[in-house]
Amino acid sequence: MLSYFIALAIAGELSGSSADKEPIKEDKIVCRSVMTVGSRIPDRVCRTKKEWANIARENEEQLQNRSNYSRGTQNRNTE
């Protein structure tokens, strides 16, 4: 049983090494299922990898800003 897992790990490393050599295309379109508030049916949203990365970065910034605001560490001179 242990040899089976070792063989899978080795095969995964071998197959992963060829993927590392290929450059990641930022213009490749990726589709995701997104839940909409008030609906049980998810919407299918397709965007490029670069757009998904920008959305993730903006979400992290908003979360950090809200966290800072709730702790009272925001810069009050800019408001």
Image (cartoon, grey):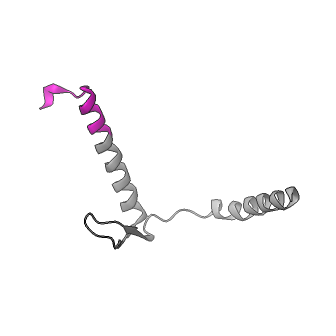
Q: Give the magenta-colored segment's residue range.
A: 64-79
Q: Quadrant of the N terminus?
A: bottom right
Quadrant of res 28: bottom left
The image quarter containing residue 44 is: bottom left
Which residue shows up at 25% across the image and 32% down it? 70
Locate residue 65, reporting x and y percent.
27, 38
In the rendered structure, the answer to whether residue 11 lies left or right of residue 71 reads right
Residue 55 % position (x, y): 34, 56
Q: Is residue 48 left or right of residue 38?
A: right
Residue 27: x and y in percent read 42, 68
The quadrant in which the C terminus is found is: top left
User: Relative to 24, does residue 65 appear above or below in the rendering?
Assistant: above
Q: How many marks?
A: 0
> Which SS does the magenta portion mostly show?
helix
Picture quadrant where residue 31 is located:
bottom left
Q: Residue at x 32, y 42 (%)?
A: 63
Q: Is residue 16 magenta?
A: no
User: Of 79 and 33, which appears nearest the observer?
Assistant: 33
Instruction: Name, please, the residue furthest toward the left.
Output: 79
Image: 42 above or below 6: below
Using the image, determine if residue 55 lies above or below residue 41.
above
Closest to the observer, 15 or 1: 1
In the image, 58: left or right of 17? left
Q: Position of residue 39 (x, y in %)?
A: 28, 70
